[in-house]
Image (cartoon, grey):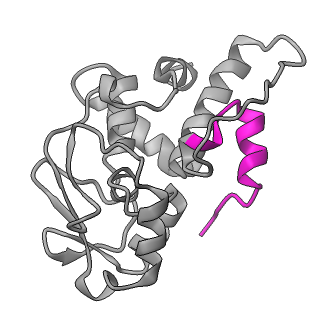
Amino acid sequence: MARNITPALKRCRSLGLEPALLGLSKKPSKRIVKERRKMSEYSVQLREKQRAKFVYGVMEKQFKSYYEKAVKMEGVSGDNLLIILENRIDNVVFRLGFARTRNEARQMVLHGHVLVNGKKVNIPSYQVKTGDVVEIKEASRSSKHFEDVFSYTESRIVPEWLDGGKDSFKGTVVARPTREQIDVPINATLIVELYSK
């Protein structure tokens, strides 16, 4: 299985992302990153794609298949792409505050700590649907790990399209997220332009 092992903070700096967006720190950075040279149209589009892949922890092959799926769906292709990425089970676990980062959420799913509608799901790319109940396995709830995680994520706001929280170790997918509810600073239009060349 391929994975990117570049240090996360270094990648954040090169892509112009806040580490707080990924759950790596609680406070936004005060450091200003200046562009060294003017970027071409292609490099701006490529950078936007790299940002999306990095934030959601997706590799190129899977990202391209998500794009092809988004194009076939009704509506704006860029918005559909972000909605598909938001509906991944590892992202939902992160959004509910059960994990500090998306990478940690991915590992929790892989290790079988997450249930969807009472059944174990160990595939991080699993797509949740409206009405699905996502919870932490009963045997895993007493772990000290979750006390540490919940103290770290206590200030995190659960998005409107999800209902539930850390107290019950359970959350429900109330609706499909809309583009306005996705707070990730990614311009999906540039990604669509890049792939449609």
Residue 106 in sight: no
Question: Which residue appears at 62% of the width and 49% of the height?
Answer: 25
In the rendered image, is residue 158 in sight?
yes
User: Most extreme residue toward the bottom, as rendered?
Assistant: 139
Task: Give me the residue at 35% from left, 59% from top.
Answer: 93
Q: Tell me, yes or no, whether the highlighted magenta stretch contains residue 10.
A: yes
Which quarter of the picture shows residue 43? top right
Quadrant of the rendered image containing residue 116: bottom left
Q: In which quarter of the image is the C terminus?
A: top right
Lateral position of residue 125 relative to residue 44, left or right: left
Residue ID at (52%, 27%): 185
- The picture places residue 155, in percent across and down from the top left corner, at 42, 47
* The magenta segment: 1-20
Q: In this view, does 42 lie above or below 72?
A: above
Question: Total marks drawn?
Answer: 0
Q: Which residue lies furthest to the right in this view?
A: 36
Residue at 54% in and 37% down:
52
Closer to us: 173 or 197: 173
Q: Is residue 15 above or below residue 39?
A: below
Give coordinates of residue 168: x percent, y percent.
20, 67
Q: x, y percentage for residue 41?
A: 70, 12
Q: In which quarter of the image is the N terminus?
A: bottom right
Q: In which quarter of the image is residue 7?
A: bottom right
Q: Is residue 184 magenta?
A: no
Name above or below for residue 95 compared with residue 106: above
In the rendered image, residue 163, in percent from the top left (x then y), is placed at: 18, 49
Residue closer to the observer: 181 or 48? 181
Left or right relative to 151: residue 176: left
